[in-house]
Amino acid sequence: MLLDIVLGTLLILSLLIAMAALTPPYYRHKPGDGVR
Protein backbone atom coordinates (compact mmCIF):
# COMPACT_ATOMS: atom_id res chain seq x y z
CA MET A 1 0.00 0.00 0.00
CA LEU A 2 2.79 2.40 0.92
CA LEU A 3 4.69 1.11 -2.10
CA ASP A 4 1.82 2.17 -4.36
CA ILE A 5 2.00 5.71 -2.98
CA VAL A 6 5.77 5.87 -3.49
CA LEU A 7 5.53 4.52 -7.05
CA GLY A 8 2.74 6.94 -7.88
CA THR A 9 4.72 9.88 -6.56
CA LEU A 10 7.80 8.84 -8.54
CA LEU A 11 5.70 8.46 -11.68
CA ILE A 12 4.19 11.94 -11.31
CA LEU A 13 7.60 13.47 -10.60
CA SER A 14 9.15 11.78 -13.63
CA LEU A 15 6.28 13.00 -15.83
CA LEU A 16 6.73 16.56 -14.58
CA ILE A 17 10.47 16.43 -15.20
CA ALA A 18 9.93 14.99 -18.67
CA MET A 19 7.38 17.68 -19.57
CA ALA A 20 9.71 20.41 -18.29
CA ALA A 21 12.60 18.97 -20.31
CA LEU A 22 10.49 18.66 -23.47
CA THR A 23 8.94 22.12 -23.18
CA PRO A 24 10.08 24.34 -26.07
CA PRO A 25 12.06 27.43 -25.01
CA TYR A 26 9.33 29.87 -26.02
CA TYR A 27 7.12 28.62 -23.20
CA ARG A 28 9.83 29.49 -20.67
CA HIS A 29 10.19 33.04 -21.96
CA LYS A 30 11.61 35.80 -19.81
CA PRO A 31 9.70 39.07 -19.41
CA GLY A 32 10.37 41.26 -22.43
CA ASP A 33 11.16 38.41 -24.79
CA GLY A 34 7.67 38.50 -26.21
CA VAL A 35 4.95 35.91 -25.73
CA ARG A 36 4.29 33.31 -28.37
Image: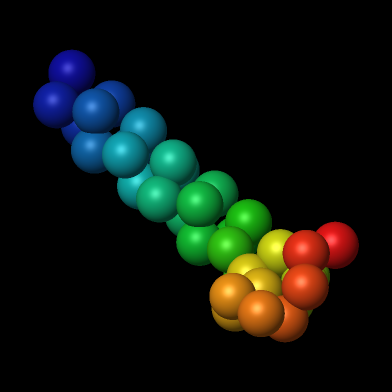
- The single residue placed furthest to the left in the displayed view is 2
Q: Residue at x 31, y 39 (%)?
A: 9
User: Is residue 8 or residue 17 the one in the foreground?
Assistant: 17
Depth check, front residue: 4 or 10: 10
In which quadrant of the rendered image does the N terminus lie? top left
Query: Residue 10: horizontal and vertical position, in percent?
Result: 35, 47
Q: Which of the two residues, 32 or 4, is positioned nearer the viewer here?
A: 32
What colouring does the structure picture have? rainbow
Residue drawn 44% across the image and 43% down it: 11
Q: Residue furthest front?
A: 32
Q: Residue at x 71, y 64 (%)?
A: 27
Nearer-the-camera pick, 33 or 14: 33
Q: Quadrant of residue 3?
A: top left
Residue 15 % position (x, y): 54, 49
The total number of labels drawn is: 0
Q: Where 18 sits versus 15, above or below?
A: below
Residue 20 image offset from top left, x and y in percent: 58, 63
Q: Position of residue 35 (x, y in %)?
A: 78, 64
Q: Residue furthest top?
A: 1
In the image, taking residue 3 as reference, residue 20 lies left or right, namely right
Image point 59% across, 75% down: which residue?
31
Q: Quadrant of the C terminus?
A: bottom right
Examine the rendered structure and indicate whether residue 11 appears above or below residue 28: above
Figure check: 31 above or below 20: below
Up-down relation of residue 19 to residue 11 (above or below) = below
